[in-house]
Amino acid sequence: QVQVVESGGGLVQPGGSLRRSCAASGSILSVNAMGWYRQAPGKQRELVATITSGGTTTYVDSVKGRFTISRDNAKNTAYLQMNSLKPEDTAVYYCNTVARTNDFVIRSYWGQGTQVTVSS
């Protein structure tokens, strides 16, 4: 069993910053990729950023230069630093973890999701 717990998020003014964290715990042998997705009202869930265990990162074009994903492999924790936030960044943000568990099976796990609202 794997738990993915998110923290951070909330209400911020345009141009402001937020930092999200996502910690995976449980029967984990190893964590592969970790990432953040978001879903705005009436839209499909989209990938925001991912990071591999080796530190390779990818970003959706709309957040490049503003968001930074990082991770602490020892803690199975990923971070998303969001700067220069815009109203169009408003969405529910979800953390995703791909992990190999004690049964040697690789699965995808989701956090509970947290609302991020960018508004004046």
Image (tube, rainbow, N blue to C red):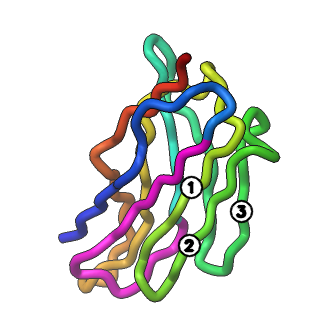
Q: Earlier in the sequence, mark 3 or mark 2?
A: 3
- In this rendering, would 9 be left or right of 44? left
* x and y percentages locating residue 34 in the rendered image: 51, 63
Q: Quadrant of residue 76?
A: bottom left
Q: Which part of the image, by quadrant, shows the C terminus?
A: top right
Query: What is the magenta range?
Result: 17-33
Secondary structure that dominates the magenta span: strand
Indicate which label's residue lies in the foreground, 3 or 2.
2
Q: Where residue 71 is drawn, which disc sits there?
A: 2
Q: Secondary structure at mark 3?
A: strand
Q: Which part of the image, by quadrant, shows the N terminus?
A: bottom left
* x and y percentages locating residue 44 in the rendered image: 50, 23
Q: Which residue is mark 1?
A: 80
Q: Secondary structure at mark 1?
A: strand
Which three-letter amino acid code belongs to the residue tagged 1? Leu
**Residue found 45% across the figure and 11% down from its top:** 42
User: Whole-Å distance between the Cαs marked 1 and 2?
Assistant: 9 Å
Q: Which residue is mark 3?
A: 57
Q: Around disc 2, counting alpha carbons within 10 Å, would you say few (fewer than 14), some (14 to 19), or many (20 or more)?
A: many
User: Whole-Å distance between the Cαs marked 3 and 2?
Assistant: 10 Å
Residue 14 higher or lower than 34, as above or below? above
- In this rendering, would 1 be left or right of 8? left
Question: Magenta segment: does it hold 22?
Answer: yes
